[in-house]
Image: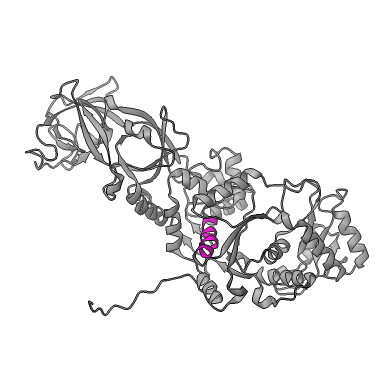
Amino acid sequence: MKETNEEPRTESISFVEEIVKTELEAGKNGGRLQTRFPPEPNGYLHIGHAKAIAIDFGLAKKYGGVCNLRMDDTNPQKEDMEYVRAIERDIEWLGFKWGKVLYASDYFQQLWDLAVNLIKQGKAYVDEQTSEQIAEQKGTPTQPGVNSPYRDRPVEENLRLFNEMNSGNMEPGRMVLRAKIDMASPNMHFRDPIMYRVLNMPHWRTGTKWNAYPMYDYTHGQCDYWEGVTHSICTLEFVSHRPLYDLFVDWAKQAGGDDHPLDDNRPRQIEFNKLNLTHILLSKRNLLILVKEGVVKGWDDPRMPTISGFSRLGYSPESILSFIDKIGYTKFDALNQMSLFESAVRDDLNLRALRVSAVVDPVKLIITNMAEDAVEVYDAVNNPGNEADGTHQIEFSRELWIERDDFMEDAPAKFFRLGPGKEVRLKNSYIIRCPETDCCRKDADGRITEIYAELIPDTKSGQPNSNMKIKGKTIHWVSCRHCVEAEVRNYDRLWMVENPRDEISAYSKEHGVEGIDAMRPFLNPESLEVKTAYVEKWLTTRKPLDYLQFQRIGYYNVDPDSTPEHMVFNRTVGLKDSWKKNEN
């Protein structure tokens, strides 16, 4: 055996995984692991949710546990089954499976019964103050709050009013149910948080049974506890909520009369940093504005930072998960450069994308020494990095489409593409040479319509002159007789500024505007360019979301709108980082 002085490599795991691993080895929760992913079905999931999905489902998968999908459907004003289905699709697309699909509304009766129990114990009361009054009397982080004048009303009155809150006869905002904890607590969340509010509207799952609905902080911990969740993994803004989470779990256990030791079976909340990226605006509220105002064409528009948007743009689930793994999970928020994400996507697509020819700014090239009816057929390698991807056939003929910027009539010395007297190699084919004079034709506006060149015989691979040395580069092409017209959608970043959230907030305060009016100054007017291109006819066999590299242009994929009769391709990312150059 060969000797080595290298230290044995150990797997690097996140602090979250380290906690889970240690507790499993210690036998906590009977050596059982159960997580949950609890999105609110009020919009499509965005890229920030992908980070939570990766750790919630990933840890359960790695350690033989289970991760349930639980919809936080406590706000029927904004929720819809469309969003439930979209959430399920996105999780499956990322490659994960849930144990059960559950809903917070599954626990509405238990939550109500617990609230009644807490009222009877003197731990909750009905408050008739306005939301403004409640906010004012809560105090500040440096000043204690003031008790509500309704804090000590009799239990019987609280029970009567609580039932009235759910009667459908009470005006929304008229009363709330608050937990009675400590108005002087340094933790603002302990200052008698609201448990229930009146909405007076039907729920899309429970119908008209409920008119008063529980708040998130009151709902979340108990649902975890009742489900048997062992680890409640969430983002850093919930650090200050954790004591309240634990307190409500304690109250749920006491009310239920459970006799198992809670310390060993308590769902443990662990917080990690969000996925923040430059040139992206998250939060479903902001994304909904973009959709409703028609700035984008739906939640899955490739300019949207939604999981379905990235999927449609051409990101693979593997590239997203690889990037998330690369930046890791920490206890400190950071702003990650979008260019790093795009770099990870390029690395991924370089291995999986099929190489094809597409001409997105076409001009006709005529090979003058080739017969008009002549056709040659070549085998093109689909992916030089993966022999198993095989080959496909392309046709070569007298008339070709090439990129307009691959020809320059008045070419400088260092222009190594086509021009008067210049030579280039055509990808997979011959070396060609333009004549010194009369090498192109123009229309009445002076725009070049045709370029003329001669092929140099025996210069294809394997032929006697194949190693002929030229200064020109290799350019791509498609045969005019053997291509199809296609729609190409060149997507760019939707936001022109690095941190749109802060810019929009500052602009909103300065100009007294909100919503789309505060967003417009920072939107990129060139975020979508639609062009007509010519592509190999072989591409009509490709299915939606297939990964492609348009040689010399960028990475593209087949849009779901595409049909064999009308092909549509989305630009995923360029071959190089063009933004870095623009920002320098």
Measured as percent of width and height from the top left, residue 176 is found at: 82, 59
The vertical placement of 152 against 100, above or below, is: below
Q: Would you say residue 59 is visible in this rendering?
A: yes
Magenta highlight on residue 55: yes
The vertical placement of 310 against 241, above or below, is: above
Magenta highlight on residue 62: no
Depth order, front residue of 235/502? 235
Examine the image and state in which quarter residue 100 appears: bottom right
Please give the name of the residue rendered at 69% of the width and 65% of the height, measured from the top-left corner.
221
The vertical placement of 135 against 433, above or below, is: below
Q: Would you say residue 305 is visible in this rendering?
A: no
Examine the image and state in which quarter residue 134 appears: bottom right
Secondary structure mostly seen in magenta is helix
Depth order, front residue of 466/376? 376
Please give the name of the residue rendered at 45% of the width and 44% of the height, measured from the top-left corner.
313
Measured as percent of width and height from the top left, residue 234 is found at: 59, 64
Colour approach in the figure: one colour
Q: Quadrant of the N terminus?
A: bottom left
Q: Quadrant of the C terminus?
A: bottom left
Measured as percent of width and height from the top left, residue 129 is found at: 84, 59
Measured as percent of width and height from the top left, residue 20 is found at: 54, 72
Does residue 511 appear to the left or right of 258 in the view shown? Answer: left
Examine the image and state in which quarter residue 145 appears: bottom right
Depth order, front residue of 572/163? 163
Task: Give the total of numbered labels.
Answer: 0
Does residue 228 appear to the left or right of 584 in the view shown? Answer: right
Does residue 79 appear to the left or right of 377 in the view shown? Answer: right
Region of the chain picked out in magenta, as a range? 49-61
